[in-house]
Image (spheres, helix red, strand yellow):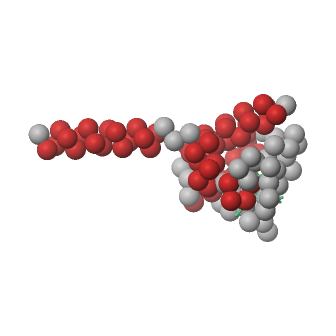
Amino acid sequence: MKYFLFLILFTVVAQVGNSQSGHDIYINYCIACHDQKLEGGRAPSLLEAKWKYGQSKKAMRKSISEEIPGTEMMPWKNMLTDKQIDTVEDNLISLKRKKG
Ligand code: HEC
């Protein structure tokens, strides 16, 4: 019985972890520099039509996973899983599209 309860608890916790959206990840890790509305502050706006380091998802992965040398943008691969980076990227891309 104890084992069964543990299993249920584990499943719930695992699902909460999985349901973390790109928005949540952004709020947790990116907002301090890129601003709540992605308009920038300490860092450039992420709503610009043209990003400095490229528009493709591959270019973005490099900016986010690896560091951008000489700037405050650190290698997020040390902090986030591949899946989390993927999710936050999709979120940023869709927000950029919305802005047009
Ligand atoms: C400590 C401050 C800081 C945090 C936190 C931060 N960034 Fe940045 N980020 C920067 C700075 C500064 C730059 C600009 C580097 C430059 O212009 O050379 C940047 C650049 C970028 C770029 C490239 C933009 C372009 O024009 O090509 C992307 C994409 C990006 N950040 C995404 C993120 C994401 C996603 C997170 C959260 C996981 C995040 N950043 C967290 C400081 C930060």
Q: Position of residue 2 (x, y in %)?
A: 14, 44
Q: Position of residue 48 (x, y in %)?
A: 86, 44
Residue shown at 74% from the left, 66% from the top: 72
Q: Quadrant of the C terminus?
A: top right
**Residue 67 visible at all:** no
Q: Position of residue 33 (x, y in %)?
A: 73, 59
**Picture quarter with ligand 1:** bottom right
Q: Is residue 74 above or below residue 92?
A: below
Q: Position of residue 73 (x, y in %)?
A: 72, 61
Residue shown at 68% from the left, 59% from the top: 32
Residue shown at 44% from the left, 43% from the top: 17
Q: Quadrant of the N terminus?
A: top left
Q: Is residue 6 left or right of residue 68?
A: left
Q: Is residue 54 left or right of residue 73?
A: right
- Which residue is at the far bottom? 70
Quadrant in the picture for residue 89 = top right
- Which residue is at the far left? 1
**Residue 37 visible at all:** yes
Q: Is residue 61 left or right of residue 39?
A: left
Residue shown at 51% from the left, 41% from the top: 20
